Amino acid sequence: MEYSIQDYLKYYKDYDFNEEPFNDVDNVLLSLISYVNLSKIFKNKTHVTIKEASDLFWSSTTEKEVNEEIRAVRKASYLIREMAKTKRFKNLKLYNYQYIVDSETQFGAVTIDLLNNMIYVSYRGTDNYVVGWKEDFQMSYIFPVKAQRLAIKYMNSTFKFRNHKIIVGGHSKGGNLALVASMYCKHYIKKRITKVYSNDGLGLRQKEFNSSEYKKIIPKFKHIIPRNSLVGILLNHDDKYYITDSSARGLLQHDATTWRCYGSHFIKADLTKATKKRETSLYKWLDNYDDVHKEKIVESFFSIFAINNITDLKELKISNFLQIIKSISNLRNVDAQTRKIIIDTIKDLYSQFRNSKSEQ
């Protein structure tokens, strides 16, 4: 029988980490906590348990407000409420919460004390801010982007005076940040890292992929992607990722709460034909251009959002969406193949945000 992450919470709720060791499903659950908006809570507190965080969040936030959020933030907000009801998660301590959005970056992270001399660092993925999506594209020709620099700094500052063993993880862009932070943090911290998870996260530029830093981290690294993936196959990655099944269709499989598990393990699957085709076409497309040309393409693409005064993808209505598609079609400094790939990508993103609005 196949189960969901929600089922996992029901069946394992009464087991702490001494009774049932940390596993891949726990990793996904903790990687999603960093999507929850805890900014108000951490204005007055240095640390809270998951139960306290959930209680404080839901006492000041309505379901209507949560349902207005994009899929990843919305799902994580409901998920932490369910985690707060379990013996396994409710007393875990959250601290060093950070969330930064400015003209250059969107970055978030939180550290979770598993109460058994083990720490999980959760890096937040891309959310509704356009600048975050632009950073994802910039990762194909810039290293490090600002979010990657902040991720490395976060690791170095968080564990300066702590001796716990460390697990590092993240979902989507957060998976890339988890990998990069583990590769380039200080050596005495790197030695304490036992596992690095990228949950459908972006890969690396060729230079970093071929680096000694990456080779050293490979034995600790696990890359999990769903059968139908877009983000997890971007940029350079090895072919040893763990492919899992999902209850969702198409690119909505990026939502890790839809991944199927059996007990503490995700159910193995094969990549869809669409993913294999997408992977090949994206590689060929990226190989066609040098970094200067990639930058021109990305700047041209995201200038369209600026012209239309869109900084938040929650503002993306059908009218300005159609205007963006028209503007991309009229771009003169990119070729037809590039325009098609950009249009297909923005359609996929739009579909994810709009089609999931009615789901709880």
Image: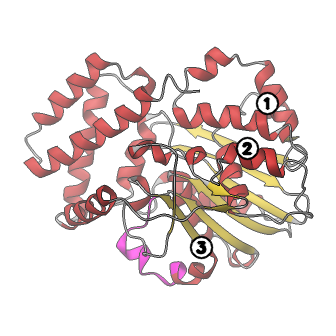
x 7%, y 41%: residue: 332
Q: Earlier along the polypeptide chain: callout 2 or callout 3?
A: 2
Mark 2 = which residue? 97
SS at mark 1? helix
- For badge 2, the amino acid type reads Tyr
The percent position of residue 52, horizontal first and vertical second, equals: 87, 34
Mark 1 = which residue? 41
The reply to whether callout 2 and callout 1 are in contact (CB within 8 Å) is: yes
| Residue 21 part of the magenta-drawn span | no
Q: In the picture, residue 344 is in which quadrant?
A: top left
Question: Between 297 and 197, which is closer to the camera in this rendering?
Answer: 197
Mark 3 = which residue? 221
Pick the quarter of the image with the C terminus: top right
The percent position of residue 256, horizontal first and vertical second, equals: 57, 48
Pick the quarter of the image with the N terminus: bottom right
x 10%, y 45%: residue: 333
| Residue 203 part of the magenta-drawn span | yes
Question: Between 276 and 328, which is closer to the camera in this rendering?
Answer: 276
Any part of residue 351 in sight: yes
Q: Earlier along the polypeptide chain: callout 1 or callout 3?
A: 1
Q: Earlier along the polypeptide chain: callout 2 or callout 1?
A: 1
* Residue span colored magenta: 202-214
- For badge 1, the amino acid type reads Ile
Q: CA distance from mark 2 to mark 1?
A: 10 Å
The percent position of residue 351, horizontal first and vertical second, equals: 36, 33
Question: Between 298 and 3, which is closer to the camera in this rendering?
Answer: 3
- For badge 3, the amino acid type reads Phe
